[in-house]
Image (cartoon, rainbow, N blue to C red):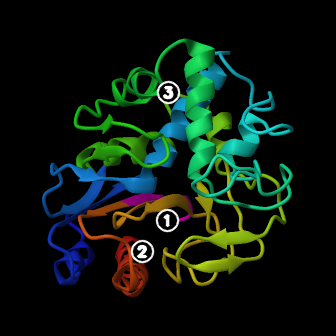
Amino acid sequence: MSLQSLAQIENWPVPTAAAAVVRADGTVAGSYGPTGHRFPLASVTKPLAAYAVLVAYEEGAVELDEPAGPEGATVRHLLAHTSGLAFDEHRVTSAPGERRLYSNAGFEQLGDHIAKATEIPFPEYLRQAVLEPLGMTATTLDGSPAKDAVSTVDDLVRFAAEVQAPRLLDARTVAEAMTVQYPGTKGVLPGYGHQNPNDWGLGFEIRDGKSPHWTGTSSSPRTFGHFGQSGTFLWVDPVAGAACVALTDRAFGPWAVEAWTPFTDAVLTELRG
């Protein structure tokens, strides 16, 4: 059965778009558009990178609470955007754990940390730890672990299925990644303004009660995922028992703020039947 709601992407003001929904049991509930087309992911790269960091943790290469990044910060701080590093500069702007400062620089320092610990360049470590085992053959990381992956809807469906029913990681590790780290921390959600609290897990943003937000008005507070400035998103709603991937080739902007929320609400309504 294909979800009719996915056809809404036809009306998005973008040159190319593709989307799919995958249930918690790994079955694809529906897809639409060129799901094999490779799109730059922008920040949807971060959940992939975070998953590789968690594999390194389970392999014993790193500990979540070992020092990494700026002084006083840890791997956990970097994953949860509380290291104090600025958005795009390797410059400290606050003490670790104090504020939720969304940071590309933090993920770049994470990549360096894992590369040093494993003696494998991070893009290669990601390939070996996550992409290859999941059969994500169309996905590559060509640069920053914060924003430089290129992938397809088909590949991200494999990743979204993994996150819902983990095979590469212990389910307890994934549950920790979906749990709020440093509760009560406020900060800016890029594109959506100040949020108090601005909840994040380990590499995944957690919806909770945020408003406005890029997911649906009917998305459960437990929904987690990420969106990217290249007009991409991936959310997982454990209450709905499903995940949704949408990739486009138009930069995030007012069009996305207008289009994404009703799209997600339509998908969730159809899933509930």
Q: Please tell me which residue is depicted at 14% across the width and 64% down the height of the picture.
A: 33
Q: Which residue is mark 3?
A: 168
Residue 211 lies, in percent from the top left, at: 63, 83
Residue 44 percent coordinates (x, y): 43, 53
Is residue 252 shown in magenta?
no
Depth check: give the residue in front, 72 or 19: 72
Q: Is residue 179 visible?
A: yes
Q: Secondary structure at mark 2?
A: helix
Classify the position of the C terminus by image quarter: bottom left
CB-based contact (under 8 Å), mark 3 and mark 1: no
Identity of the residue furthest to the top in this view: 119
Q: Is residue 228 above or below residue 90?
A: below
Real-space CA distance between mark 1 and mark 2, rounded to the nearest whole angstrom: 7 Å
Question: Quadrant location of the N terminus?
Answer: bottom left
Q: What's the CA distance linking mark 3 and mark 1? A: 23 Å
> Residues in magenta?
237-244
Name the residue at 25% across, 72% down: 6
Residue 121 versus residue 44: which sits nearer the camera? 121
**Which disc, if any, is residue 111?**
none
Which mark identifies residue 240? 1
Q: Is residue 122 left or right of residue 100?
A: left
Residue 142, x across and y down, in percent: 33, 36
Distance in Å between CA atoms under marks 3 and 2: 27 Å
* Residue 164 visible in this rendered orientation of the protein: no
Q: Amino acid at mark 2?
A: Leu
Q: Badge 2 is on which residue?
A: 268
SS state under label 3: loop
Total number of numbered labels?
3
| N-term-proximal mark, 3 vs 1 | 3
- Dot 3 amino acid type: Leu
